[in-house]
């Protein structure tokens, strides 16, 4: 009976979520595990998390709750605060932070030290770059 109920819930979650999703909770937990210590400590924690079954619970919560929310709202509440940083060979730097509303706060610094801060917002058909004053400085149409 328990196996049938679990299979039914799992099938329903796939059907109801309707999307692959970002699995933000799983990735946050996996990243946390990787930052605990050396490879031996990480392996022990990984083993214990599979035995307890922390990983199974985290994936189930992602699948049933957070990916469904992401599908219907367009953003995953757990993914906010995720950051991206990159520097190219010429010394140009970009950093971006995902906001709770799904937008990205972007900071660009070129090799000469010139800075630009803006926010990227997306709706179904358009991606907009918006400056600090709220003015649209660039716009890109997305063909779906």
Image (spheres, grey):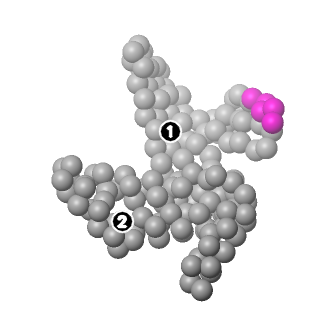
Q: Secondary structure at mark 2?
A: helix
Circle 1 crowding by C-alpha within 10 Å: few under 14, some 14–19, many from 20: many
Of labels 2 and 1, the one closer to you? 2
Does 51 sit left or right of 2 as displayed?
left
Using the image as rendered, state which of residue 61 and residue 124 is in the foreground.
Answer: 61
Q: Is residue 80 above or below residue 106?
A: below
Q: Residue at x 34, y 56 (%)?
A: 32
Spot occupied by residue 109 in the image (x, y as percentages of width and height): 46, 25
Q: Residue at x 46, y 43 (%)?
A: 83
Q: Nearer the viewer, residue 31 or 15?
A: 15
Q: Quadrant of the C terminus?
A: top right
Give the vertical position of 79 relative to 58 (above or below): above
Return the mark for residue 50. 2
Label pair 2/1, CB-CB below 8 angstroms: no
Residue 73 in sight: no
First in residue order: circle 2 vs circle 1: 2
Does the magenta-highlighted stretch encompass residue 16? Answer: no
Q: Which mark is drawn over residue 112?
A: none
In the picture provided, is 48 more to the left or to the right than 112?
Answer: left
User: What range is drawn magenta here?
Assistant: 140-144
Q: Magenta residues: mostly which secondary structure?
A: loop
**Vertical relation: 4 (above or below) 64:** below
Residue linked to disc 1: 96
Q: CA distance from mark 2 to mark 1?
A: 33 Å
Displayed quadrant of residue 113: top left
């Amino acid at each position: 009976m328990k196996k049938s109920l679990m299979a039914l819930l799992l099938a329903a979650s796939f059907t109801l979520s309707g999307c692959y999703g970002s699995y933000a909770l799983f990735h946050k937990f996996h990243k946390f595990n990787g930052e605990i210590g050396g490879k031996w400590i990480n392996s022990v924690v990984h083993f214990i998390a599979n035995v307890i079954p922390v990983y199974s619970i985290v994936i189930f919560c992602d699948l049933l709750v957070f990916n469904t929310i992401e599908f219907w709202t367009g953003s995953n509440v757990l993914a906010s605060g995720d950051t991206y940083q990159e520097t190219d060979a010429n010394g140009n730097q970009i950093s971006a932070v995902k906001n709770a509303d799904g937008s990205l706060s972007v900071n660009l610094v070129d090799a000469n030290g010139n800075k630009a801060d803006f926010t990227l917002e997306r709706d179904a058909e358009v991606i907009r770059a918006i400056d600090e004053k709220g003015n649209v400085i660039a716009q890109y149409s997305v063909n779906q």
